[in-house]
Amino acid sequence: MTDSPLVIVGLSGGVDSAVSAWRLLQQGWRVEGLFMKNWEDDDHGGHCSAEADHADARQVAETLGIPLHRANFAAAYRAEVFEHCLDEFRAGRTPNPDILCNQRIKFRAFLDHARRLGGDYVATGHYAGVDGPPGARRLRRARDDNKDQTYFLYTLDQTQLEHALFPLADLTKPEVRRLADQAGFGNHDKPDSTGICFIGERDFRDFLGRYIDTSPGPVVSVDGETLGEHIGLAFYTIGQRRGLALGGRASRPGLPWYVVDKDLTGNRLIVAQGHDHPALLNTGLIAADWHWVDGSGPGGTQRCTARFRHRQAEQAATLVPLDSGCWRLDFDQYQRAVTPGQSVVVYDTEGCLGGGVIDQRIPITKVASVGAA
């Protein structure tokens, strides 16, 4: 047992990482835990649950009889994840901090720290799988389609994948909770986290407003009618319905309003009525900053499936290389609310090929009043 490889499990205080540690012990690995603190709670408003999560992680470690280390990566998170996201919001885009956090913190800073502790591998409670020989690792979908998290892991490189273990690849969430209960973990029924990575579950608009100045401007319909005022384009995203403060309008009865575009030059928020308004639909997208799991990517045009949000069903598409180094994705069917700044992740039958950051939407229709701004 003492000669077996050492795995450092990122114990978050949640049920998924707890069962990951338990499964590895059952499989004969040497296991130690590490609790990461990646955000300094500076408002004392009760949103940040770091200490409560650490207590849950400590209870899991005590139940398993394994050491629990603690590390603070808050400075790295702020510099490498949070500041980048603020820049993206200011540019009118909608970033995904969880993806960058996995690349820069969970599988870089954590991996480096685990090696200093003598670890050979790191493990997390992500729902994904890894297989293949060194240098040719493949990122596989999880068995539980509803929980599959390959969307958040597409930026991992071959070195990171070679040292990563995902013990939940073949389990569903209900099975994980049953195993946690059987193992005696007090967090077996703890709700899943739904907040932004490491920042917690708080009012996002209030939180973002502490770092980004408001810049009010008009809310305009797709046919040019001024309907109201927004607080700043950074605070809205494509497809958003809530928070527009338009209310009922006698001249515009019926369907609710949705954000369909942002006019950065004129500081105008463009809206339209109806969940599936044509201005929300796209035939494809162009994405930049591509990362390929195998390190090289396709040699040319390729059929694939894709998703541009977590838990979205994979959509059939064709991947086309562009001279700029970007790739265009042409969907077989119209897609709703493609959002610049978010990631699009592509797959073949074997698993996740990689992904890129959405730069442009390809609309099914152009609205003259918006383009003329």
Image (spheres, rainbow, N blue to C red):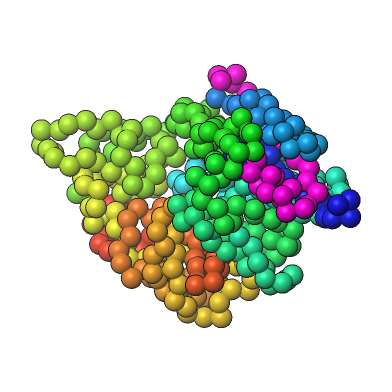
Residue placed most toward the observer, 67 or 206: 67
The picture places residue 281, in percent across and down from the top left corner, at 29, 58
The answer to whether residue 177 is above or below residue 367 is above
Residue placed most toward the observer, 72 or 218: 72
Residue 79 visible to an observer of this rendering:
no
Question: Taking 171 as reference, is 318 left or right?
Answer: left
Question: Taking 101 as reference, is 278 left or right?
Answer: left
Quarter of the image for residue 293 reads: bottom right
The answer to whether residue 285 is above or below residue 168 is below
Q: At 44% from the left edge and 76% from the top edge, which residue is drawn?
A: 303
Of all residues, the one furthest to the right in this rendering is: 3
The answer to whether residue 162 is above or below residue 21 is below
Q: At 53% from the left edge and 36% from the top edge, which residue is drawn?
A: 193
Residue placed most toward the observer, 294 or 225: 294
Residue placed most toward the observer, 149 or 283: 149
The picture places residue 112, in percent across and down from the top left corner, at 79, 49
Quarter of the image for residue 246 reads: top left
Give yes or no for residue 107 being in the magenta stretch. no
Residue 316 visible to an observer of this rendering:
yes
The picture places residue 130, in percent across and down from the top left corner, at 64, 63
The picture places residue 162, in percent across and down from the top left corner, at 73, 62
Residues shaded magenta: 18-46
Q: At 50% from the left edge and 61% from the top edge, which residue is drawn?
A: 345
The answer to whether residue 26 is above or below residue 41 is below
Give yes or no for residue 29 being in the magenta stretch. yes
Q: At 60% from the left edge and 64% from the top edge, which residue is drawn?
A: 139
Total marks in image: 0
Question: Taking 348 as reference, is 279 left or right?
Answer: left
